[in-house]
Image: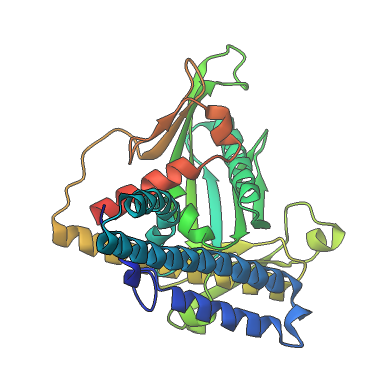
Amino acid sequence: MKNCASGSLGHGGYFDIDRKFEKVVELRAQMSSPDFWNDRTKAVEVGRLADGLEQEALAWKKLLDETTELEELIALSQRENDPTFLEEAQKQFEELKKRFADLEFFVMFSGPHDESNAIISLHAGTGGVDAQDWTEMLERMFFRFAERKNWSVEMIERTAGNEAGLKSVTFKVAGHYAYGYLRSEAGVHRLVRISPFDSEGLRQTSFALVEVLPELPDSAVAEIRPEDVKIEFFRSSGPGGQNVNKTSSAVRLIHLPTGIVVATQTERSQHQNRELAMKILRGKLAQLGLDARAEEHANLKGKVEKAAWGKQIRSYVLQPYQLVKDHRTGYETSNVDAVLNGELEHFIEAYLRNKAGNS
């Protein structure tokens, strides 16, 4: 039985418990401000973040305290040479090891924006109406996952398909480590099933693209120069009342240096939609920087990509058999209904562990 390295748990160690508690104090101070509830949406998000961070920090602190007690018990058993103490120490060690494994999952959230809210965009790909229907199925899957985590979802943009499903949709998921969890879902998702839109009942393969961005404050990325952004206003095409549809409240931003385009139309005013679009643009620019650094790192390592059919990161097969398989990690399950109802934890954990092992 190895001694537990309790010193690594706090005071700037691997898990930096002190920093977590300091962050909770900062958030609680914000919550005590007289005008804190003026922006109710932001206030709820800050409250959830503070609660989640505090629970995590308290769990680590309890584990640290019990690890210290275990070390004292081990030392006592060695001094007294009493097998009773040693048996008790072994029992406590096994319990702590299991709890450590549960909490260790959070250590894999080491990215610079992992604690941020996530902005998810889904786009129908190859597959016609089936692809649009698949995009709506993915929207529901992510909504169900957010419900399981007790996170909130805010719609940003939603464009319906001509016959069924969605051409595209963008929404924000607000919760502690939302981006850290959901960044593993970025990529092409492939569906194989008997098409409900095919009169001959043929099997159809369809694709949808999932983009995941962190929601960042103004200070998190380099300043966006006004002359680098082209702003266009247009009328909202979706539901939202007569005022939304009759006025040009929707906003489209075009970032000229990169060609990134962002459109929002769910809010009632141009100002609100513009602020929302700028948030998404900041996230896209930050992700662009992360992708560039990752590509540079891969080139330095001499990483060679295998030539393979398709671009999908995960396949969902409904017929002739049932299987969901992640092609990056090899993790798979035949419980397709559970996955489509938001049970993504095992796929996310497999991705994060695989990524940590390859870094």
Residue 246: x, y in percent? 82, 61
Q: Nearer the viewer, residue 141 or 277?
A: 141
Report the side of 214 relative to 36 (left or right): left
Q: Nearer the viewer, residue 128 or 216?
A: 216
**Residue at x 55%, y 68% (from the top left corner):** 53
Residue 173: x, y in percent? 60, 58
Q: In the rendered image, which quarter contains the C terminus?
A: bottom left
Residue most toward the bottom? 34
Q: Classify 314 as above or below 224.
A: above
Q: Is residue 259 visible?
A: no
What colour scheme has been applied to the protein in the rendered image?
Answer: rainbow
**Residue at x 58%, y 83% (from the top left corner):** 26
Residue 143: x, y in percent? 63, 47
Q: How many marks?
A: 0
Q: Classify 346 as above or below 22.
A: above
Q: Is residue 295 visible?
A: yes
**Residue at x 44%, y 47% (from the top left corner):** 348
Residue 192: x, y in percent? 48, 25
> In which quarter of the view is residue 293 placed?
bottom left
Residue most toward the top? 200
